[in-house]
Amino acid sequence: MFSNKIISSFNEMECSLYKYVITNAEKVTYMRIRELADETHVSTSSILRFCRKLDCEGFSEFKVKLKLYIAKNQPEELKSTQHALSEFVERTLKGNFESYIKETASFISKAESVIFLGIGSSGIMAEYGSRYLSSLGKFSLYIKDPFFPIHSKYSNDSVTIALSVSGETMEIIDLIKKLKEEGSTIVSITNHKDCTIARISDLNISYYVTEEYRSKSNITTQIPVVYLLETIAKEIYKQANS
């Protein structure tokens, strides 16, 4: 409704009117045109010209579109962390996580180094996984820069842990391809198996939780990823000291 193009076309009076409408949107939907004119100190004809700029034939249509705009931009109720944790725990008990964790740990135990990949929130998890594993005595590094140069000295005799909720992050896919060409074993941790990253990996661990988005941001819980990274690291330590 209020696109950047339309807002940039407003004159000083229309900008003032726009600011009032946005600040008092709920209230405006119940006002008469005369009431809005009195509140904003502009004429009713100015308000009608404002409405036409927004592709509305009159003030009534403007209020209808404003109600739809409010509803569209209303914050969605977020799932509780407890709900996300319960969802993951239930699926963990039913899945094959233990066998996947042991297989991943076996790959890493035989490798010289570990490379964690991730971008955005998955990049933070990659950094955490690298630090956690290094604390337990296994050399690892993380890459959260999609333009990070891949050299053979990093990937020779290595295992790559690729993190992606969607499993379709193009930058991670490109990095995985480069690392596979250098001979790195790829283990991916994604939210589901039906994704590109899972298909091109040597081993995939999927945790299946309900994905959440706020606007364009993916805010899906990272609790399963923390659990898997810590459990894999501890299994490696266990195998090395058994």
Image (tube, grey):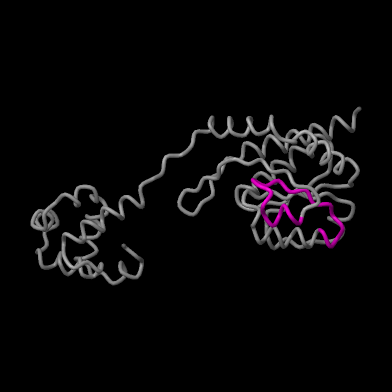
How many numbered circles are shown?
0
**Residue 131 within the magenta-colored segment of the rendering:** no
Q: Please, is residue 74 above or below residue 146 in the view?
A: above
In the image, farthest residue toward the top: 242
- Left/right placement of residue 165 relative to residue 6 reads right
> Residue 57 is drawn in which quadrant?
bottom left
Please provide percent x and percent y for residue 5: 34, 70
**Residue 195 within the magenta-colored segment of the rendering:** yes
- Left/right placement of residue 91 relative to residue 211 reads right
Pick the residue in front: 17 or 165: 165
Please provide percent x and percent y for residue 124: 64, 46
> Residue 135 is drawn in which quadrant?
top right
Pick the residue in front: 87 or 171: 87
The residue shown at (31%, 69%) is 6
- Left/right placement of residue 125 relative to residue 200 reads left
Pick the residue in front: 57 or 241: 57
Please provide percent x and percent y for residue 205: 73, 43
Please provide percent x and percent y for residue 33: 11, 58
In the image, farthest residue toward the front: 94
Q: Please, is residue 99 above or below residue 191 in the view?
A: above
- Left/right placement of residue 131 relative to residue 32 reads right
Q: Please, is residue 167 above or below residue 135 in the view?
A: below
The magenta stretch is 180-200
Q: Quadrant of the C terminus?
A: top right
The residue shown at (57%, 40%) is 221
The residue shown at (75%, 43%) is 130
Q: Please, is residue 166 above or below residue 101 in the view?
A: below
